[in-house]
Image (cartoon, grey):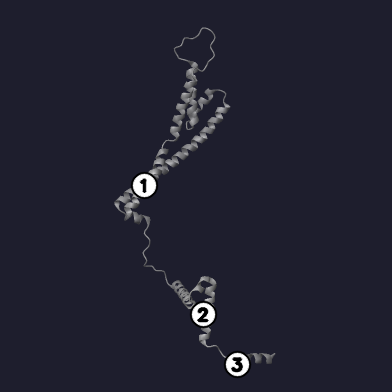
């Protein structure tokens, strides 16, 4: 065992050491093989040029990691600073856009609450209408459910029905048995319901046209601000 170890040691000591330039050449070859594995298209160029560029890039990256951050670089301007240093025309246009935006959001929130309340009261009205056997009972709860569009339709139809079934107030009372109430004009009832429908739709669509107008004209106002800033 000792003799074998001594023989191996003598052989290793008898081998001549490689010169430094040969070791450096082997290191360059290994680096080039590594670069070629990462970037296959690099073999189309000069290997020495590619290797030098790669080593230079790696050296710059290592140096950049050790450098402290540049504190003298000016910070990016904020929105307030941009608006403050803008021209008068741009500031006026931005104020107009801000006014349109605030008004639109207020209308959106208001209409959302209105539609939610109308849907809730419409469900309550339909439940009362289906359970009641007389129109007078339904008419009694209409005052508390005025947000529902069906209440306006019902009240218009109920008023027209009473006007046609009861007749004029100045008619003489008949001496015989009371006649059976009949509907005098179906077209009159239809017109009353159409008028009530138009009224309720207009009430639900109130202020919605402002949102449509805002969506149509504000892009052009913003474009004029862009042209003024340039």
Q: Residue at x 50, y 73 (%)?
A: 44
Task: Determine contact: label 3, label 1, CB under 8 Å.
Answer: no
Residue in front for this viewpoint, 68 or 211 = 211
Residue 84 placement (x, y as % from top left): 32, 54
Residue 187 placement (x, y as % from top left): 48, 21
Residue in front for this viewpoint, 173 or 216 = 216
Q: Which residue is mark 1?
A: 220
Direction from residue 141 to residue 73 in the image, left or right:
left
Residue 224 placement (x, y as % from top left): 34, 49
Q: Which residue is mark 3?
A: 14
Q: Residues within 10 Å of mark 2 (few under 14, many from 20)?
A: some
Q: CA distance from mark 2 to mark 1?
A: 62 Å
> Going by the picture, which residue comes out furthest to the top?
175
Q: Residues within 10 Å of mark 1 (few under 14, many from 20)?
A: few
Q: Earlier in the sequence, mark 3 or mark 1?
A: 3
Q: Residue at x 53, y 81 (%)?
A: 27
Instruction: Report whether residue 39 is seen.
Output: no
Residue in front for this viewpoint, 131 or 19 = 19
Residue in front for this viewpoint, 144 or 64 = 64
Q: Earlier in the sequence, mark 2 or mark 3?
A: 3
| Quadrant including the N terminus | bottom right
> Going by the picture, which residue comes out furthest to the front?
44
Q: Secondary structure at mark 3?
A: helix
| Quadrant including the C terminus | bottom left
Q: Residue at x 42, y 38 (%)?
A: 208
Q: CA distance from mark 2 to mark 3?
A: 27 Å
Task: Examine the rendered structure and indicate whether residue 164 appears above or below residue 145.
Answer: above
């Amino acid at each position: 065992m000792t003799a074998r170890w001594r023989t191996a040691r003598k052989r290793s000591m008898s081998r001549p050491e490689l010169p430094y330039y040969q070791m450096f050449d082997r290191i360059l070859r290994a680096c080039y093989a590594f670069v070629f594995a990462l970037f296959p298209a690099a073999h189309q160029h000069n290997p020495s040029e590619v290797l030098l560029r790669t080593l230079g890039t790696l050296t710059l990256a290592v140096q950049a990691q050790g450098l402290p951050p540049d504190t003298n670089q000016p910070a990016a301007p904020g929105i307030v600073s941009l608006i403050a240093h803008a021209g008068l025309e741009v500031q006026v246009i931005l104020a107009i856009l801000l006014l349109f935006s605030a008004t639109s959001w207020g209308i959106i929130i208001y209409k959302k609450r209105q539609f939610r309340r109308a849907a809730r009261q419409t469900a309550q009205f339909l439940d009362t209408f289906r359970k009641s056997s007389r129109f007078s009972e339904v008419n009694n709860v209409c005052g508390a459910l005025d947000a529902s569009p069906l209440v306006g339709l019902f009240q218009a139809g109920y008023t027209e029905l009473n006007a046609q079934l009861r007749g004029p107030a100045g008619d003489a009372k008949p001496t015989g048995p009371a006649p059976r109430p009949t509907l005098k004009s179906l077209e009159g009832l239809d017109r009353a319901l159409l008028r009530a429908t138009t009224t309720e739709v207009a009430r639900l669509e109130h202020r919605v046209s402002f949102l449509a107008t805002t969506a149509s004209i504000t892009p052009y106002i913003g474009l004029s601000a862009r042209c003024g800033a340039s």
